[in-house]
Image (cartoon, rainbow, N blue to C red):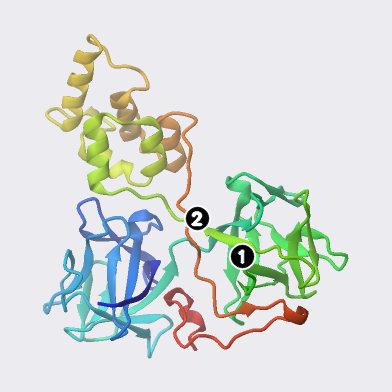
C-alpha cells in the first residue's frame, strides 16, 4: 500500500457520546474517554483512497470487520477485511465508515460495536487527537505564547499557561479562535497593535508561511496584522511584511502506554515518574486486575506476590511510597488523573508528545504585503470533515 499520509484522531459516536478504543490487550472497547487508548491512526492508501485504521498505542493492531458484523483487531495491515471507506454521511451529520470488503457500515448501538447493512447509528465524528490543544512557539525563538488571567506574554515554559485551544470557526477555512486552556480567555488584538486576552472572541487567520523557515503566520482577522514579538519577547501586531517571525503549532497529545510497557514496568518494579507521566488514565484497570482494591490486596493475586517480594527485600516491612504501597493507595480510593500523579510521587514531569497539528488549506505570502489564499485542497483532512461541504 502506498500511503498518502495519516492522521491521529478519535473515532466518536455522536449519538451515544462514546469513543472507540483499543485496550491493554489490543482488544476493541467503547468508552466515554478522550485519552490515549482511544486515539487511532488513519492511514490513507494513495491508489484506492481507502483507509486502514490502526491503534496509536498498540501500533500493530488494525481495525477489522468480519462478514458476520464482528469488529475486532488483527495485525494484518495488507488484508482486505482491514480496509475502510470514509465518506460524508448521506443522511446524518458526520461521516460514514464502511467495510470495503463486506459493504457493511460501522455502527454503535449503545451496547456493542459492529457493522451492519442498515444506516441507523452509523454516523461518526472523527476528531483530532490533540483536541485542538497546542503550544504556540515562535519558530526562530525559544519562546511560547503564554498568558495569565490578565494579559498575554511569552515564556520558555511548556506548562499549563502555555497551552491554547485553537478552534476552527467551521465557517471559513483558515479562521480560528485562540483560547487559553488554563484561564479560558481568548487571545485578541487592539487597533494600537496591543495583544490582549478577554472574554470576547476574536478571530485569527492562520496559514502556512511561504518564508524559507516555514511555520505559520497568525493574523488578526479584524485588523489584518500579523502576530509577532520583539527581541525581548514582547507581543504585538504589525504589518504582514514587517518581520520574518513565524509560529509553530506543537500539538498536545494525550499520554499513552501499551500493555507491554505496563507489564515490563511492573515486572521491574518501576514507579514514580514513569507511571505518573505515562499511565494515569490507564492505571485503574491495571491496578485492579493486579489485585489492589478498596478491600485491600487480594489473596493469591499478583499484588500479593509483589507485597511478599517487597517485604522480603525490605526485611519484613512495606516501604511507604514504594511500589506496593502506591499501587494499593490508587486501588483503594480510585484516584483519577491528579490523584494518581500525586500518589506516585511529587515532582513527576508531564512532558507531552509533540507533533504538528492538521491546519492547512490556507497559504500566506509576504510578497507585496499581501496574503494569498489557495483554494481548499480536494481532500481536506479527516478531522476537517465539517468543511467538506
Q: Nearer the viewer, mark 2 or mark 1?
A: 1
The residue under label 1 is 213
Asked if 343 appears above or below 144 in the picture, the reply is: above
Return the residue found at the far right.
Answer: 192
Asked if 66 appears above or below 100 in the picture, the reply is: above
Residue located 24% across and 86% down the image: 118
Estimate the x, y position of residue 340 in percent, counting from the top left.
41, 37
Q: Is residue 358 left or right of residue 135?
A: left
The residue under label 2 is 252
Numbered marks: total = 2
SS at circle 2: loop
Residue located 38% across and 31% down the image: 272
Other-residue count near label 1 (Cα within 10 Å), few / some / many at <14 / 14–19 / ≥20: few
Estimate the x, y position of residue 308 in percent, counting from the top left.
18, 19
Residue located 22% across and 10% down the image: 316
Of residues 20 and 377, which is closer to you in this image?
377
Residue located 50% across and 70% down the image: 358
Q: Is residue 204 left or right of residue 93?
A: right
Other-residue count near label 2 (Cα within 10 Å), few / some / many at <14 / 14–19 / ≥20: many
The image quadrant that residue 195 belongs to is bottom right
Mark nearer the N terminus (2 vs 1): 1
Amino acid at each position: 500500500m502506498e500511503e498518502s499520509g495519516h492522521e491521529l484522531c478519535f473515532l466518536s459516536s455522536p449519538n451515544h457520546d462514546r469513543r472507540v478504543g483499543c485496550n491493554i490487550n489490543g482488544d476493541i472497547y467503547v468508552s466515554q474517554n478522550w485519552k490515549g487508548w482511544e486515539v487511532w491512526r488513519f492511514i490513507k492508501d494513495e491508489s484506492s483512497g481507502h483507509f486502514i485504521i490502526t491503534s496509536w498505542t498498540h501500533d500493530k493492531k488494525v481495525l477489522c470487520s468480519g462478514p458476520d458484523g464482528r469488529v475486532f483487531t488483527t495485525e494484518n495491515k495488507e488484508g482486505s477485511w482491514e480496509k475502510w471507506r470514509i465518506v460524508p454521511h448521506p443522511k446524518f451529520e458526520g461521516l460514514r465508515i464502511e467495510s470495503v470488503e463486506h459493504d457493511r457500515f460501522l455502527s454503535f448501538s449503545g451496547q456493542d460495536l459492529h457493522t451492519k447493512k442498515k444506516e441507523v447509528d452509523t454516523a461518526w465524528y472523527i476528531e483530532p487527537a490533540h483536541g485542538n490543544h497546542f503550544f504556540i512557539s515562535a519558530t526562530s525563538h525559544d519562546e511560547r505564547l503564554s498568558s495569565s488571567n490578565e494579559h498575554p506574554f511569552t515564556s520558555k515554559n511548556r506548562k499549563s499557561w502555555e497551552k491554547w485551544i485553537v478552534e476552527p470557526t467551521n465557517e471559513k477555512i483558515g479562521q480560528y479562535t485562540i483560547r487559553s486552556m488554563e484561564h479560558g480567555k481568548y487571545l485578541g488584538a487592539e487597533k494600537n497593535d496591543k495583544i490582549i486576552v478577554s472574554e470576547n472572541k476574536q478571530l485569527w487567520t492562520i496559514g502556512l508561511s511561504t518564508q524559507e523557515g516555514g511555520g505559520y503566520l497568525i493574523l488578526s482577522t479584524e485588523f489584518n496584522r500579523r502576530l509577532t514579538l520583539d527581541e525581548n519577547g514582547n507581543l504585538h501586531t504589525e504589518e504582514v511584511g514587517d518581520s520574518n517571525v513565524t509560529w509553530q503549532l506543537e500539538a498536545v497529545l494525550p499520554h499513552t502506554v501499551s500493555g507491554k510497557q505496563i507489564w515490563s514496568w511492573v515486572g521491574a518494579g518501576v514507579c514514580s515518574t514513569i507511571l505518573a507521566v505515562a499511565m494515569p488514565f490507564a492505571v485503574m484497570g491495571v491496578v485492579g486486575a493486579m489485585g489492589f482494591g478498596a478491600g485491600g490486596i487480594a489473596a493469591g493475586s499478583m499484588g500479593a506476590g509483589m507485597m511478599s517480594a517487597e517485604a522480603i527485600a525490605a526485611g519484613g516491612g512495606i516501604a511507604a511510597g514504594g511500589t506496593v504501597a502506591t499501587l494499593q493507595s490508587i486501588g483503594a480510593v480510585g484516584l483519577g488523573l491528579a490523584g494518581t500523579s500525586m500518589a506516585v510521587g511529587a515532582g513527576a514531569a508531564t512532558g507531552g508528545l509533540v507533533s504538528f497539528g492538521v491546519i492547512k488549506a490556507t497559504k500566506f505570502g509576504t510578497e507585496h504585503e499581501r496574503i494569498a489564499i489557495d483554494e481548499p485542497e480536494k481532500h481536506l483532512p479527516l478531522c476537517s470533515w465539517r468543511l467538506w461541504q
